[in-house]
Every structure is written in C-alpha cells, then in structure tokens.
Amino acid sequence: MPLPLRRPSRDPGRPVPVRALPRGPSGRLRGTGRRAAALGLAVLATLGMAEPPARGPQGLGDRLFPMLGNTGYDALSYDVSLDYSGHNDRPMNALTEITVRATTELDHVNLDFARGTVRSVKIGGLPAAHEQHGEDLVLTPAFHVSRGQEVKISIAHTSDPRARGDGGWLRTADGLAMANQADAAHRVFPCNDHPSDKALFTFRITAPQELTAVANGLPMSPGVRAGRRTWTYRTTHPMATELAQVSIGRSSVVLRHGPHGLPLRDVVPTAHRAALAHWLAKTPAQMSWMERKVGPFPFEAYGVLIANARTGFELETQTLSLFEKAMFTTEQLPAWYVESVMVHELAHQWFGDSVSPRRWSDVWLNEAHATWYESLYAEERGGRRASMEARMRHAYQESDGWRADGGPPAAPKAPHAGQKIGIFRPVVYDGGALVLYALRQKIGPAAFDRLERAWVERHRDGVADTSDFVQLSSEVAGQDLTRFFQDWLYGERTPPMPGHPEWRPKEAAAKPGHPKGAGVVHGPKGVAVKPGPHGVVTSPGNPGPKGAAVKPAPKRVHPAARRVNPAPKRAPVHPVAKGAVGKPAPKGAPVNPAPQGAAAKPAPKPAAVHPAPKGAPVHPAPKAAAVKPAPQRAVAPAGKPV
C-alpha cells in the first residue's frame, strides 16, 4: 500500500520528479539538486503533466484482498515488543521495529495497521511523519530511500486486544492468543500484511511474573525486573504475518523431543495440564508419520497451543498450532478424529507455512494438502469409518454445488464485505483435496508421492502459486498437465474422475436462485448445511471468533467426524452425535465474537460441536462452496482443523 516513486528514466527528454530527488537529513532538497528540480518543474508546467499521486492507501492488488499488503519494499525482519499489564481488556504499549529493503525509490512507505494509536515513528533513527488512512499507516521519512537501501522503521504504538469480531487478538479465560488469518495481523502490530512478504520475527513480551508468554520460534534467556518478566522468542525461518502467534496466560510449557531431537514445546492451561497430557504425547509419532510422507519437518521447533477459549476453529500458526481446549475435552469426539485434526494443522507447517501462497487465490494449495493428509491419517486410524475413497466420492458428488456457491478451487469468489474469512469454503478444503485425488489417479501413486516431496523441498521457506504447482506436476509426471488442471481448478463443473467413471455429481432439484447441481441448502453466512449422522444437521462452519473472524468449518473435516462450533480460520466443523449436547465453554472463558459476517469453514463429519477454518491461476474462472455431508454410518462427533 505504499506509493513508491520509481527512479526517473535516463532519457534526457523526461523530467526528474522533484520528490524523487535526494534529500538531506532535514528532508530538504540538497543544493546539488535544486537546479535540476527547477528544470523539472518547468518541464512539468510546459507539458501540463499532473503531480505525483497523493499519499494514501494502495494495496498489492490481490484479487481477494486488493487493499492488503504494500509495494515498494521487502520486509526482512520484525522485532515486536509488547508490554502486557495482566488485563486482556486494556490496550498495551508496544514497539514494532521493521527492517525493510527498498525495491524501488521511496519518499514514503505504507504499512498495514489498525486497532492502535501511533505515538511516534523513526526511520533510519530519525523522526518521521505519519498519517493514518483507513487501515494504512503512511510514513514519510526525513530522507529519500533509494532502491536496494535497507532501513529500520521503529513505531511506538498501542495494541488493543478488545475484540471487534474481525481477528487479531483472541481473548482467553486467563490472557491472550493470536488468530490472524487471513488479514488480521495488522490489527495487532504494523506490518506488510500479506503472505507473499515473509520475514524473520522476534517477539519480546513483558508480563507479570506469574504469567507465561510463548511465541513462534525458540526461546531466548528471559529477563526479570520489578516483579515482571520479559520473554523473548525468535524464529530462524521466515514467516508470513498471518502465522504470527503470541500466547500469554496461566500456562504450563511441556517440553519433549520429536524426530531427530527436534525441540517440542506444548502450551496448555496449567489447571488442565494433566487432562490434556495424553493428547500432547501423540505429536512425536504424528510428526514421524508426516516425515515419512513428505520429508523432514521444515522448522526449528513445533508444539501445540491449547487455548482456554471458545474459538470454533484450529489454526496452523508457525511452529505453534492453535487449538481450542474443547476439542480435546469433548467426549463425543472419537480419538481418531481428534488426532486427524491435529495432523491437519501439523501438515500445514509444510503446506501453507513453509510454502506460503503467493496470493490468497492460491489458498487451496494450503487447505487441499492439509485436508489430504488429515484424511489419510484418519483412514489409517479410523478404518472404514474414515474411508478416503468414500470421503472423496462424497466430495465429488458435492463439488458442482461448491463451485457454484464459492467458485472453483483456484479461483474462489471474493468474500463479501465484512466476511474476510469467507474464502475458507468447502471448495478449498475437500474440494481441493478432490483435485489432489484426481491428480493421483491420473499420474499414479509413485509420481504423486515424488511430487509432494519435490514441492515442499523446492519452495521451502518461500512462496509459490498455482502455476508453480502445475509446472512441477507436469515435470514430475513427464506429461503436460495444463489442460487437466485448467478443468479441475478453474472449471465451473467438476470433470470426470480418472479411474471412477461411475462417479456422478449430485443433481439438485431446480430452485429459484439455486444452481442446478448445487445440491445444498445454504446455512449461516452462505455456508452449506448438510445432514449429519442420525439426521443431525451439521454446518461446515458456524460463525465463531477466530480471534475475531469466523472461519468455515474445520479445514476439511472428515465426513465421518464433525463438529459444529463457530470457528475462524481453518476450524473444522463436525456433526454432533445423536443426542449429544455441545460442551459448554469453560467457566470464565470468553466467547470471542465471530468475525463480522465471516463464513465458517468446512469440517470433517463425526458428531460434535466445533467449527473451523482456510493460488496463481492458469486461467481464472470462479464459482462455489459447500459443506461435506457425513457418510451414512454412525460415527462419533468430531472437531475440525483450520
């Protein structure tokens, strides 16, 4: 959203824009450039040219979030300091330092920021002017920033955790956590809030000594002063802003080791540590399972953060996945289902975190893969109750309806105003996994497995888009798959399934305003509602605070397991077992408002009450979304991953 000024052409016939000339520390034009400036102004007057555009918001132009992100620079690192008083209903003092490298000539820089008051700004150690334009913070340095130049931006501001239903801070019963997907990190700290600009992060959290603070990455030595402790965490791999995580509360940190001695640290409410211990112990084996499928874990550490709050979703924040406590304490959910949701978020560490989407239209690459491995794991643990083929056949039946409602997998419809997380529809979860199933059917299991490993290895710590996936798939398979992906990722109707000519999409009775073949009834916020086991109605995702925004049902929830709980980004939704009553939120746990109009994410299908969450096109052509019905068999309830 910055308004970059490009270096003028060397063409002597073109004037030199005054604002592009070098400035001294005072911001004034250097003497050596005054005559050139006067000449430039004279030429401008002669040609009748307009002055450079005024400062204001200017996003990256992402098709789904056009005003999100900024151009003109590359963020290299963030150092975020937060001073928490112990009260999660009061703004906290914060200092955010961002090191950026200019990718063009800059006289001002835009950052995404809202929900806080800016007190002062320095750029390169010198005071800088700042203006707020909507959710853009426009900074004017005291000097011109040249292309390739690195500068540090320091912003003293407040960060307000009081929820407004649109993401960012998530208030828990005893403190705070973050849920920033898809566009809410800038409601916590100033940043270039788009997954295409990843950077290294350091978090310094000062809080009362009786509380524990944890963030992405590895811990540094804590400092104690006057009854308060400062916790410092640092990442060793770049991270997208939407994946940032900070947890503050009365928590215990459970330490163990994963494959190859990888540090594991789980963060749980101290009062519930014993009850949650057996779930936490499953992570090492799950990591080994994923490594056998796609290769080495991509980060320096991993762990599970269990929040004592009603969220309705789970979230793959980098190195520390966020889960709602109720998912582990709701007795109706079968163990295989809960574990598959844990694997969904774990798989995201490779797909979505290490390899991030270049644009939000590429989000299917995140959700399709996480859903794929969730389903494979569920099948291994749940047997016939969680058949991958049955789940994919069901998805095939619903696919035309999903496309009609929310667009094809790689060309999702833009979210409606106030429904930013509406992009997390069933079509990117099970609909995306269906594309992977079709690809495996076409190129064979061996080539598919090689492709999965090659994808995460080639794009590790980077960003990639749909065209990258199409290219690599063709390379690994030894055949041109452009037409195959064009039809499966951008078609309005679902193509025939390779190897299963008998599969047919569901034909729905024609209804006014209801596209033929949709076969779904719209649920809350446009999410399709389908009957679950024993006739229980389950929604892909009921609105629930994703820290603020509500996401679609759990990132692709298995048809055999499903919960119905509002959920933000990738929170799974699953059907409630017959006669089962949703477990009330823990006493004192705040219910965070669902994101303004945010749509819920689709989720697996065992009965339960739990909502959940989350491309460069070959040739765009949007359409459709819906929730996957639970298979016709009695299954215990389950929750769903984001």
Image: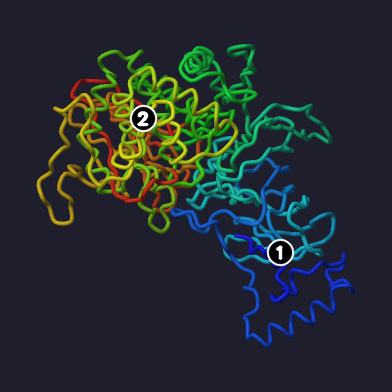
**Is residue 501 visible in this depiction of the protein?**
yes
In the drawing, does residue 354 fall left or right of residue 402? right
**Is residue 609 visible in this depiction of the protein?**
no
Query: Farthest residue toward the right?
Result: 31
Q: Position of residue 568 (x, y in %)?
A: 44, 41
Find disc 1 in the rendering and name its residue: 7
The residue shown at (49%, 51%) is 166
The residue shown at (72%, 73%) is 17
Res 215 quadrant in image: top right
In the drawing, does residue 291 fall left or right of residue 424? right
Query: Farthest residue toward the left?
Result: 509
Q: Which circle marks residue 384 in the picture?
A: none
Q: Position of residue 416 (x, y in %)?
A: 38, 56
Q: Position of residue 338 (x, y in %)?
A: 40, 21
> What residue type is disc 1 on?
Arg
Disc 2 crowd, CA 10 A, few/some/many (<14, 14-19, 20+): few
Res 331 quadrant in image: top left
Find disc 2 in the rendering and name its residue: 479
Front position among marks 2 and 1:
2
> What residue type is disc 2 on?
Gln
